[in-house]
Image (tube, grey):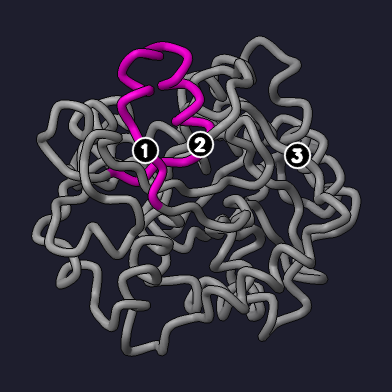
Amino acid sequence: MVSSVTRPRLPLRGVFLVALAVALPWLYLGPSAEGTQGKPSTLLIGSSGSITSQSNPKKEKSDLQSLKDFIKEETGMTNEIETEKDWRELTYKMVKKQVQLGVYQGYEFAWAVAKQPGLKPLALSVNVYVYPVAYVVAQRSGKAKTFADLQGQTLAIPSNGQRFLRLFVERKAQEAGKKAEEFFAKITAPVEIEDTLDDVVDGKVQAAVADRAALEGYKRRKPGRFAKLREVAKSQRFPPPLVAYYDGSLDQATLTRFQKGLLNASKKERGQTMLTLFRLTGFATIPSDFAQVLAETRKDYPPPAPDAE
């Protein structure tokens, strides 16, 4: 099913934007020489969805404020972080330069850049592997051997911000001519991936979806339980969540500093703390095959109509 490579257990969450804070010390250049009287500049960041996995609005607001305070404390820069309606609205604001940096799910960026080539990836968020892969697993002792066999069963999708997992399941269900909620009798949303997989082993649900890194971690920690799972579906490589900019929105020197901060986050103690806290392994530069992966994603997962989102 998956290899047994030993890697850290750091499943990526939707809160990965918080790790941007570790990069911001490279951005602060001091007061402007044009009479700002020492006032810091304001960095505008937009996100295509919630930046936390919190279901509690008050807790999410608190987490967001903590992030903004941290950025201000570390850099002297005021900052605004906006959660946009969707990837289309974020793209519009990027093009209009109403935000300077954008945080996209990888597949959303594939859709957006096809319409706006001026969008450029700055750094990829890494969850052990650069390109995540989704797996649907069921009990090895059960009857399900393919995704189609799961119709009418219960599926668990971890509520950890890995939206590509749901996208994969939704498109597999569409192959049967149904929405995911119609294909499955019930879809649960455990908070932790280990709980998700345990639920399959214990028979609480018939199947679960997880990424490659999570499954490898589960295999390493619970080999006996992992052996009771069977792969019934596997996705192609997805582009990972990423930080992007639009041509001309920031000067090259600032972009270079920001990128350097992201790439070096894991090399500094404070950066390591932030990455570990928010379950990231780091950030990566753009691979040579990235455009190919984007094209494959657009082919296999074309964007939904605006009124279908």
Q: Is residue 70 above or below residue 8?
A: below
* Badge 3 amino acid: Ala
Which is nearer the N-term, disc 1 or disc 3? 1
> Alpha-carbon distance for marks 1 and 3?
31 Å
Q: Secondary structure at mark 3?
A: strand
Quarter the C terminus occupies: bottom left
User: What residue lies at 61% left-to-right and 69% top-to-bottom?
Assistant: 297
Which is nearer the N-term, disc 3 or disc 2? 2
In the displayed structure, does residue 257 sit left or right of residue 28?
right
Q: Which mark is residue 230?
A: 1
Task: Examine the structure image and report whether residue 207 is included in the region drawn in magenta.
Answer: no
Structural crowding at the residue carrying mark 1, measured as other residues with C-alpha within 10 Å and reported as few (<14), some (14–19) or many (≥20):
many
Give the residues in magenta: 208-232
Q: Is residue 68 visible?
A: no
User: What residue lies at 14% left-to-right and 55% top-to-bottom?
Assistant: 153
In the displayed structure, does residue 197 sit left or right of residue 87?
left
What residue does disc 3 label?
A: 284
> Alpha-carbon distance for marks 2 and 1?
8 Å
**Where residue 186 sits: x, y (%)?**
10, 56
**Where residue 132 sits: x, y (%)?**
58, 46
Q: How many marks?
A: 3
* Badge 1 amino acid: Arg
User: What residue lies at 42% left-to-right and 71% top-to-bottom?
Assistant: 86
> Alpha-carbon distance for marks 3 and 2?
26 Å
* Badge 2 amino acid: Met
Q: Which mark is residue 1?
A: 2
**Where residue 81 sits: x, y (%)?**
48, 52
